[in-house]
Each structure stands twice: as C-alpha cells, then as structure tokens.
Amino acid sequence: MKKFKKLLSYNTNSIIIPYIIIAFVLVISQTNRNAYGYEPDFIKGMGIENFEVSADFTRVTTTGAIFLINKTIGKIEIYQRIGKERKLAEVTISTKFNPIFNKMPQDEGFEYVWSKGQRKDSKIIISGDSLIRFYDLKEINIRLFFSPIFEKVNPSNKGLIALDDDGGIAIMPPTNISLNDYQINIEDNEWKFNSDSKMPVLFVGICPPRIFDLERSRWPVIHYSSHIQRYPSDQQIKEYSNYAKVLEMHQWIWKNRYTNNQLCSQERYNNCDGVNTPFWADNSASTLNNKYVPDNEKELLRVISKAHEYKMLVAVYFSGMEINQIAILKEVSRLQKQYNIDGIYLDGLLTNTKEGPLDAYLTARELRKLFGDNGWLNFHNSHNGYFAPFVQTYMDFVTTSEHNNFDRWISTTFNISNAIGGLWPEIPYFWPDSSKNIQDARTFLKNLVDLSMKYHNRILFLTGEQGQWRFWRLYFTSEELEFLKKYYLKPLGGN
C-alpha cells in the first residue's frame, strides 16, 4: 500500500480522490516490477513503472500516463502525467473484453498484453510509451476530457490528432481501412466507432509519452549535403567538432547513379540545367537491391573514423519510403555493423504501407533498440498536420515542414512526441523568379530561431559545398554560420 499511495500523491485534484476511495475500499494486490530481481524494460526513457490489480480495477502506470481499467464495466480512464497532470480521456469498449481484463496480462517487459491466449482472439496491449493498441474491435467510444486547441482529422479513416499546449491524444485506425466498411463519427468531443466489421488495430497514444531531453536539445547538429564534394574533409570535420556533437550526411554519400534522361522539364519544379537533368538528381537516395552502396567506401570510412576521433556521433542518410519493414531493419543493421555508424537520418518511414501506422511504429521501436538510447535518429517527417507522435517519440530529432513555413502545430514536437523538433532550414536560392530567392539568409534564420526557441524547437546547421535540392540551398554561408553561432548557440548554451 505504501508505494500505491506514493504514486497517487503527485496529483492533488482529479486523480487522487477516486484513487483514495479505491485504495480504502479495495484490498490491492500490486506487482512491483522491480521486485523480481530485474530492471523493467525502458526505451528512450519510456517504460511501465508500476502495475496494480484488485477485484474490480487494474492500474498501469507508464512514464507518460496512467491507465485505470474498470474490469466490470469495460471502461478505461486515461490520465496524463507529463506536460500537465490531468484526466485526458475515457475509453468505453464492448463488454466482450471484460473476460480478457479479468485475466492477468502477459508481462513482456515493455508492455502488458491482455488476450485469451489464442492468436486470432481480440487483445489489448498497453506499452511503456503510453500507447494502447486494441485488436479486432467492433465498438469503442473515446471521450476527451480536455478542450483541444488544434485538431486534425485524417479524411480517409477519421484518425484524430487532438492537442493543446500541454499535450493531448492521437487516435489512429489502420491507414488502409475504408469508411464504407467502418462507421466512425467524431462529435461533441467524442470519437466513436461501431461497426459490423472488425477493425484490425486501433492506436490510442498519449502525448507526450516521455520527458523532453533538454540536454540533447542543446547539441548542435551538422547536416552535411553536397553532390559536389560528397564527403567532408578532415579539416571540415575538425571545424565542425569545435561546436557540434552530431554529423549527419545526406544522400550523396551513396552511389552516384546519374542518368541524363533530359526529361526533367516534366517535373513540377522544372529542375533542368538547360535540357539536362541536374547533377544533384542522381538517384543516390534509393537503395540498390535494398542496400546502400557508398559512392566511395574508403572515404565513408575515413569520415566516420575521423568524426569519432573528434567525439562526434555519425548518422547516414536512409530512405524509409521504398522498402518494407524487414528490409529496412536488415539494411540498417548491416550499415551499423559494417561502417560503425551511430544512427541514421531517416527520410520518411513507411507512410505508403497498407499496414500503417503499425509497421512504422514497430520499425521505429526496433531502430531505437538497434542504436540504443545513446544513438542518433533524425526523422524527416514532412507531414501536413496528421502524424503519429508515438512513432516520432522514438527519434532524437524530427525534421518537419519541407518547403513550408513554420507552423505552430506541424513544425513543433514539444509536449507532443517530445522528440527534438526542427524545421528543415532550406533557403530559397535557385528559383528562376529571382524575387523568391534569398542571397543573405541571416534575417530569415533570425526569424526561424526566434520561432524555434519560443516553441522549444531547434535548428540544424546545413553545410556542404553547393548543396542543393531543387530550388533550395542546403548550406549556410560562412556569414550565416557565424551569425547562428552567436545568435542561436550562445543563448541556447550549446558548445
């Protein structure tokens, strides 16, 4: 009982009163996950901290949430723990799940699994990242107990992101369901599903699931992009190490497969050099038979070795858009072992898969396990406001809003996923209409820094000889770089 009371004491209003009543009325049998001689499984600071069960209630405490399960009426009360301590939502499910909840769940370290034990049976999983997955649902009602400032509904499946400045919730059905087969309604702060067709899996994720990593957020990160000089020199790496802790390298470290097909004028950006395909469009972003081949293996090994010599982490470009989950994990594991990388710059992740968001979620978890909490994952996720915070939270950095202006909800991550958020700081430079171009980006960068700091975002340092992508410059001039060191790094407390 002592630990149970201690866990309740942090919230003095909406949470403590019902729990005290339960504590006095019921005889609580609790399982302390440390009592069996092992440490709980935690990933990126997230895990299940406590599990308690009584005759009528089960209570699961994760890093970011409390889930209070009323086993007699099939209701789950959800309380947020990070950002703001409050009751966030109530979930009411079909009574068919009552027998499942009256069984002890299977403890898998990072998550608890309730099921009848049969593979095809309905099941519910609560994981340490403050996420519930419901499998084979026909009916569920989710009532929000806060007033969102920002809401985004995915029109294809009525998935919902609901947020305010302190946090919120993500409700996500499978990507490939049809609203013709699944009856979903959103009204009066409630998300309702009632259908004859079973929904394979429904995600309900609590925001934020983990503490914001303030220390890492102060790390300057170099993002190197050049199709002219595909690998930074030793001298450049030495200079980077004087103020940065991470070296990311864009696609041009991989095999140059340039083809001058002279058809680039058909692209909407009109990316032609006269009648020729521009050299930066060399297909190096794509794998060869699901593998990334260095354009110069000796040079790649040199860069990684030199960066490690200067105590920098190294992350390499990896597209997660064109190959499946198994191929992604296999290839990233190979790159890690063969080249001793510390992480990847992940350019998208399985957004077109029929198994979304499940594949992306499970892949993100495995990538984090692969590199560990000390590795570096930068997720380039240029969403339009509909996104999966429970995927983003496994990343160290989330780069958003490609070719877009700063947006309070699309560009930021604080109290949402609590990964480090950053707008892609590309600079308009190569537009045929010169009025769109910026020659000196210091004012542009000042405005970006001001907005970023206001919302706990951070800035990538873009470097590389003549780095370009379509009409945007992917490098800062020496004057812009020095400006950022003074205006951004010094107040931030970075090196």
Image (tube, helix red, strand yellow):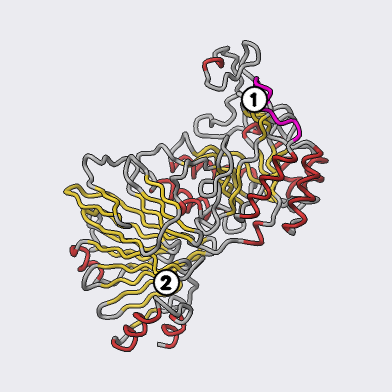
Image coords of residue 365 (percent x, y):
47, 53
Query: Which label number is shown at residue 280?
Result: 1
Q: Residue at x 66, y 39 (%)?
A: 249
Specify the principal SS of the magenta part: loop
Q: Is residue 343 left or right of residue 118?
A: right
Amino acid of disc 1:
Trp
Query: Which corner quadrant holds the N terminus?
Result: bottom left
Residue 439 position, x and y percent, is 74, 30
Residue range corresponding to the magenta coloring: 430-440
**Spot occupied by residue 36 in the image (x, y as percentages of width and height):** 44, 78
Task: Name which residue lies at 35% across and 74% down.
Answer: 59
| Residue at screen point 49% across, 45% down | 329
Residue 360: which disc?
Answer: none
Is residue 434 highlighted in magenta? yes
Does the magenta portion include 224? Answer: no
Q: Is residue 150 shown to the viewer in this render? A: yes
Q: Quadrant of residue 139?
A: bottom left
Inspect the image, locate mark 2, and give the three-letter code of the amino acid beneath it. Thr
Q: Is residue 381 above or below residue 62?
A: above
- Of the residues under marks 2 and 1, which one precedes in the sequence? 2
Q: Secondary structure at mark 1?
A: loop
Residue 336 shows in the view: no
- Badge 2 local density, few (<14 within 10 Å), some, or many (20+)? many
Q: CA separation, marks 2 and 1? A: 49 Å
In the displayed structure, does residue 324 sit left or right of residue 295?
Answer: left
Marker disc for residue 61: 2
Q: Quadrant of residue 97?
A: bottom left
